Image (tube, rainbow, N blue to C red):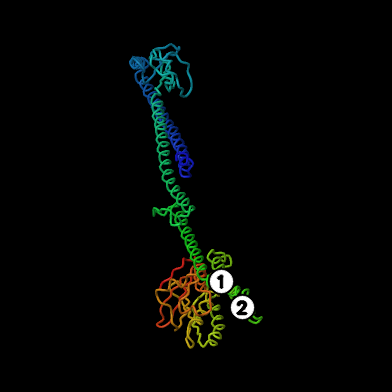
């Protein structure tokens, strides 16, 4: 767990930001250090010049003797004095002060504390005096101010840097450990969920905190994928069970015919009839498997690469025109109200959308009694494009509205008509692929099938059916 935490992306990012922040703290304190030192040195230099000017003023007012008395009095302080003095006469002889004899120089210079006539024993070798020479009536005067305040300030700033940097690194490491541990827990939860799913527990889902962060988004996407995966597995299991149930009877009939041909002495005509019936049975079985394969391919989303802009009004107009003849041959009437002023362009696979509406029209024609009117309508419901196929036939009981979309499911009144029971399953698969919503409703009498599709340019949505 500790190794995983150190290797986690969150911990590494936190460590990287801690290092970056530490560099910023060092740069900040370095700038503060340099600026503070510069300002203190500037203030010290101004104070030095002010002290020099005051002593020069004393010499001008009271003469060299008065200056000698003042310097001598100020130089009697024992220990480490704040001000250093050296007064020379015109011959260079030391008259007063607490410094050893010094050569003259221009401007200011730092003189070490060891140059005191009696340096203190506990003095730091880094201490010194910022000094300047001045010409006075009767000689020359050297004045120096201790730079101890500069060193003390630098030490304070440096101490603040060390403590601040230490606190920054400590807090950053603690924050990195906490963030990494928290993120690692969620990553472990995702990993354990996927591990359980890989062992067959398809009901497991990644726990979400609901704060909509990146891990929540990843978890939501994983859960959506697992929902889809479970749906596909459940659909596959249902299809397998339905195939075993619905194909058992035709395969049994096929076996009986073939056994009869082998066992009984049939005429050539009877044998031909048996073989023709067997071929028809095999063709029906092959048709069922081809339909199931097509549904599986559509549910896998393989056709999305062929999505293009499709004009539903034009497509439905062609279908109504074509199937109105088929409906008349079966004793029905098929009409269309396609609303010419309604925009009806969707993004999808034209071939599959044609298959969807053909299946619905053929179902209505096949399962409605002769003389039943069938109507196709096109309109808008909110932002959706809605296609409505209504008939006045027997309809579907409300309790069966969900089951009719299951593969190989057939209502009792439909078992006597030709078909595989896969038409509405194919409709469902195509609708899901296009993000369409299917609603079944009672037409009193008859059935209304409403397909609502998002217009072109909008993302597809999951399928929703209501009874």
339 above or below 219? below
Q: Nearer the viewer, residue 21 or 120?
A: 21
Q: Residues within 10 Å of mark 1 (few under 14, many from 20)?
A: some
Q: Which residue corresponds to the image point at 50% horizontal and 76% vertical from the top-left?
A: 343
**Regarding mark 2 in the picture, which secondary structure is present there?**
helix
Instruction: State the image coordinates of residue 35 (x, y, percent, origin top left).
Output: 43, 34
Q: Judge left or right: residue 388 versus residue 292.
A: left
Instruction: State the image coordinates of residue 409 (x, y, percent, origin top left).
Output: 48, 72
The residue that disc 1 covers is 251
Q: Nearer the viewer, residue 188 or 366?
A: 366
Q: Residues within 10 Å of mark 2 (few under 14, many from 20)?
A: some
279 above or below 433? below
Q: Judge left or right: residue 101 versus residue 300.
A: left
Instruction: State the image coordinates of residue 386 (x, y, percent, origin top left).
Output: 47, 75
Instruction: State the image coordinates of residue 286 (x, y, percent, origin top left).
Output: 59, 71
Specify which label sits upstream in the sequence, 2 or 1.
1
Q: Nearer the viewer, residue 400 or 442?
A: 400
| CB-based contact (under 8 Å), mark 2 and mark 1 | no
Q: Nearer the viewer, residue 14 or 200?
A: 200
Image quarter hosting the N terminus? top left
146 above or below 345? above
* Residue 299 visible (yes or no): yes
Q: Which mark is residue 178?
A: none
As measured in the structure, the alpha-carbon distance from the residue carrying label 2 to the one carrying label 1 is 14 Å
* Residue 97 visible (yes or no): no
**Regarding mark 1 in the picture, which secondary structure is present there?**
helix
The residue that disc 2 covers is 274
Q: Which residue corresponds to the image point at 43% horizontal and 80% vertical from the top-left?
A: 395
């Amino acid at each position: 767990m500790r190794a995983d935490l150190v290797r986690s992306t969150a911990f590494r990012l936190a460590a990287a930001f801690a290092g970056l922040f530490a560099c910023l703290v060092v740069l900040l304190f370095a700038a503060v250090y340099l600026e503070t030192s510069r300002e203190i040195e500037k203030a010290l230099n101004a104070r030095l010049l002010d002290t020099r000017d005051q002593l020069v003023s004393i010499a001008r007012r009271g003469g060299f003797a008065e200056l000698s008395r003042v310097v001598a009095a100020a130089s009697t302080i024992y220990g480490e004095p704040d001000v250093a003095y050296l007064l020379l006469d015109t011959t260079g002889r030391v008259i007063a002060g607490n410094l050893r004899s010094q050569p003259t120089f221009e401007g200011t210079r730092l003189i070490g504390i060891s140059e005191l006539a009696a340096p203190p024993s506990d003095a730091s070798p880094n201490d010194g005096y910022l000094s300047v020479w001045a010409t006075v009536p009767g000689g020359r005067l050297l004045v120096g101010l201790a730079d101890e305040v500069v060193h003390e300030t630098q030490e304070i700033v440096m101490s603040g840097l060390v403590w601040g940097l230490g606190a920054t690194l400590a807090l950053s490491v603690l924050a990195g450990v906490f963030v990494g541990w928290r993120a690692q827990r969620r990553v472990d939860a995702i990993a354990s969920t996927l591990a359980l799913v890989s062992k067959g527990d398809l009901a497991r889902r990644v726990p979400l905190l609901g704060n909509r962060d990146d891990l929540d988004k990843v978890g939501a996407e994983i859960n959506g994928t697992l929902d889809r995966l479970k749906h596909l597995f459940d659909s596959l299991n249902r299809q397998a069970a339905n195939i075993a149930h619905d194909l058992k009877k035709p395969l049994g009939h096929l076996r009986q015919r073939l056994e009869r041909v082998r066992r009984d002495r049939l005429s050539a005509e009877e044998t031909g009839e048996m073989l023709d019936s067997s071929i028809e049975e095999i063709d029906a079985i092959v048709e069922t498997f081809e339909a199931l394969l097509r549904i599986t391919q559509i549910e896998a989303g393989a056709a999305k690469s062929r999505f293009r802009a499709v004009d539903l009004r034009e497509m439905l107009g062609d279908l109504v025109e074509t199937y109105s003849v088929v409906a008349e041959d079966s004793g029905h009437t098929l009409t269309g109200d396609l609303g010419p002023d309604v925009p009806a362009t969707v993004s999808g696979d034209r071939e599959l959308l044609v298959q969807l509406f053909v299946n619905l029209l053929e179902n209505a024609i096949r399962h409605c009694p002769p003389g039943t009117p069938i109507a196709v309508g096109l309109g808008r419901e909110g932002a959706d494009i809605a296609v409505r196929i209504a008939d006045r036939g027997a309809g579907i009981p409300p309790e069966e509205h969900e089951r009719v979309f299951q593969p190989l499911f057939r209502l009792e009144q439909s078992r006597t008509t030709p078909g595989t029971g896969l038409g509405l399953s194919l409709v469902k698969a195509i609708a899901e692929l296009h993000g369409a919503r299917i609603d079944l409703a009672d037409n009193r009498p008859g059935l209304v099938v409403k397909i609502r599709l998002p217009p072109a340019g909008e993302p597809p949505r999951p399928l929703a059916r209501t009874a």
